[in-house]
Image (cartoon, helix red, strand yellow):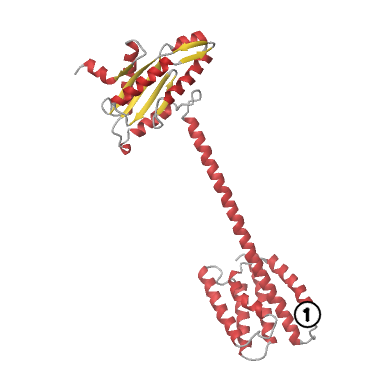
Amino acid sequence: MDEGRSREGWLAGLTLTVGGVLLTLAGPPGPAVWWGLSWSIINGLVLVTGTFFRSRQGQFFLLGVNLVLAGSWLFAGGGAGTPLFPFLLLLPLLVPLYLGQKQVVVAGLVMVLFLGLYWYIKAGLPLNSHSLALWGGWITLAGFCFFAWLKILDEAFKVSSLQAEVDHWHREYKRSLSQLAAVELMAVTDDLTGLFNYRYFEQSLERLLSPQQQLRSLAVLMIDIDHFKEINDSFGHLVGNRVLVELAAILKEHTREQDIVTRFGGEEFAIILPGTDYRGALQVAERIRRAIAEHSFNKAGAPVRLTVSTGIAIWPEDGLNKEELVARADLALYQAKTTGRNSVYPYRMLKAEAGP
């Protein structure tokens, strides 16, 4: 124990020992005197030296010793005729809880001193050694009880404060997680269209092709806007950006929730269709192509018509890894553009044309 704790131990030990001795001597002679003296002195020494307070086992041992000594003292008739009797029943349980606070001990002694003096004067007790012993024992032991109860309340407030701090940091932790998730989302989101970006496309495709996903098929669509440069040249880049935003909404509208729609770069978009085979990918691509061709992009006071070209690659038949799938979807897209645009071209057809 440090120096402050040692001083507090001496003060608390002194109050308990003196109070117990005075009260014991105020009682009738007999075995109760020896039990009371033993109980008071042992607890005083424990509080002074700090013994048994360093471990939970020691505190339980001290509690047992207190119960035996105090029980023997009460069984022998000690304290039965004194006004301190109710307080003594609490002391064996309070002593093991002692941890030491000098200010609380002093405050308790001062308060109980006034209460004891008031009780002594009101009772009109004669001024003799017996009444002085009762008065002194009442003041010191009740002061120790007061100290112990305040110590318990202080520990309860500390626990409450600690719980409040834990709750605060738990809220901060959840807020930090939310902010981190928002930052991570921003890192994989295209600022203009709100779609996922190229980085997210790469990460998602690699994750979906891992053995843990156990997918039976997967399709990659590479979509490019036909003659988009003419829109920028005729209406300006601001109108071109609005067209990209509107087209992104059409792509989201005609795909499933589990599909991953991304802006691959510039006027090119890429869509990952998990669990989709050749026939399903062809249907999705054709539905998107038709929806865009039929849509009127009314910008700058004039309707703007767009078409898109789409290349399709299917896993695992068109490629076994991310690089092969993207490269072959790009080849199919190039073929769609060279054969007239506004069309869907699967890599399967390119392989068939190339022959064995």
Kind of element beneath mark 1: helix
Q: Please tell me how many numbered marks the rendered image carries.
A: 1
Q: Is residue 326 above or below residue 45?
A: above
Q: Position of residue 144 (x, y in %)?
A: 67, 73
- The answer to which image quadrant residue 141 occupies is bottom right
Image check: 316 left or right of 96?
A: left
Q: As rendered, which of 189 and 226 lies closer to the eye?
A: 226
Q: As rendered, which of 314 and 266 lies closer to the eye?
A: 314
x 33%, y 37%: residue: 213
Q: Position of residue 212 (x, y in %)?
A: 32, 39
Image check: 230 left or right of 332?
A: right
x 76%, y 74%: residue: 115
Q: Is residue 3 in view from this perspective?
A: no
Image check: 135 left or right of 350?
A: right
Q: Position of residue 49 (x, y in %)?
A: 60, 72
Q: Quadrant of the N terminus?
A: bottom right
Q: Is residue 214 above or below residue 162?
A: above
Q: Is residue 231 in view from this perspective?
A: yes
**The furthest residue to the front:** 294
Disc 1: which residue = 120
Looking at the rendered structure, the kind of residue marked 1 is: Tyr
Image check: 307 left or right of 7?
A: left
Q: Quadrant of the C terminus?
A: top left
How crowded pointer 1 is (Cα within 10 Å; few <14, some 14-19, many 20+) is rated as some
